[in-house]
Image (cartoon, helix red, strand yellow):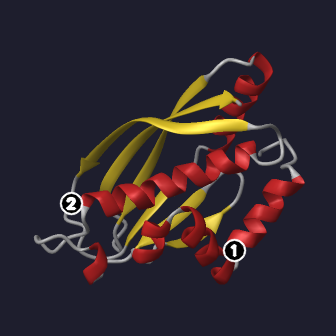
Amino acid sequence: MNTREIHPKAAAMIKDLSSSWKLKFFFWRKLPSLLFWRVKLQHLNAERAVVSIPFIKKTQNPFRSIYFAAQAGAAEFSTGLLAILAIEGRAKVSMLVTELRCEFYKKASDTIVFECTQGNEVYDTVTKAIESNEGQKITMISEGKNAEGEVVTKVWFEWSFKLK
């Protein structure tokens, strides 16, 4: 985080997920649809996660664009990674998506790159959940852009965090 040190377990997770075979194993164990859709992790640190989803037969709908659920899956991964890093090594905290909203601005007919930059905010939300022993919520936004840098999709996820 900006002025915080990240937990060594979170740093190890960033390193592990930067390895393509460890990322594929993570998908296989936890999120097999992302493996099927060939989602790739482009960048990850404590503040920002960038994920891409290709326009391929497996992600395509009958209208020749990326299926909305595939886009939502990639977008969720970009927000969920930051949430996992905020929790990793700190406490046993459950996390759950409690609300989802999507807006589609353009046809997703090439690789879409989703980015979430709310690592500091989710860290603070998790800290509050740990310190107060009360459930906390945060709305995280992932913005999907095409190769031209145009916003194609914007997805809002409300994440809930609670000590186990």
Residue type (three-letter) at the residue carrying disc 1: Ser
For residue 12, side relative to residue 86 (left or right) = right
Task: Identify the residue shown where x is 23% and y is 74%.
Answer: 60
Residue type (three-letter) at the residue carrying disc 2: Lys
Q: Nearer the viewer, residue 127 or 144?
A: 127
Quarter assignment of residue 135:
top right
Q: Nearer the viewer, residue 3 or 67?
A: 67
Question: Do we see residue 5 in this rendering?
Answer: yes
For residue 44, side relative to residue 61 (left or right) = right
Label 2, on which residue? 106
Query: Up-down: is 56 above or below 139?
Result: below
| Element at label 2 | loop
For residue 56, side relative to residue 14 (left or right) = left
Res. 18 mark:
1
Q: Nearer the viewer, residue 85 or 34?
A: 34
| Element at label 1 | loop
Task: Identify the residue shown where x is 87% and y is 47%.
Answer: 5
Location of residue 113 in the rendering, given as x and y in whole percent from the top left corner: 43, 67
Task: Identify the residue shown where x is 26% and y is 58%.
Answer: 68
Task: Identify the residue shown where x is 65% and y is 83%.
Answer: 21
Q: CA distance from mark 2 to mark 1?
A: 30 Å
Query: Up-down: is 99 above or below 147?
Result: above
Question: Do we see residue 151 in this rendering?
Answer: no
Quarter assignment of residue 125:
top right
**Mark 1 neighbour density, 10 Å: few (under 14) some (14–19) many (20 or more):** some
For residue 131, side relative to residue 149 (left or right) = right
Location of residue 123 in the rendering, given as x and y in whole percent from the top left corner: 71, 38
**Mark 2 neighbour density, 10 Å: few (under 14) some (14–19) many (20 or more):** few
Residue furthest to the left: 63
Q: Earlier in the sequence, mark 2 or mark 1?
A: 1
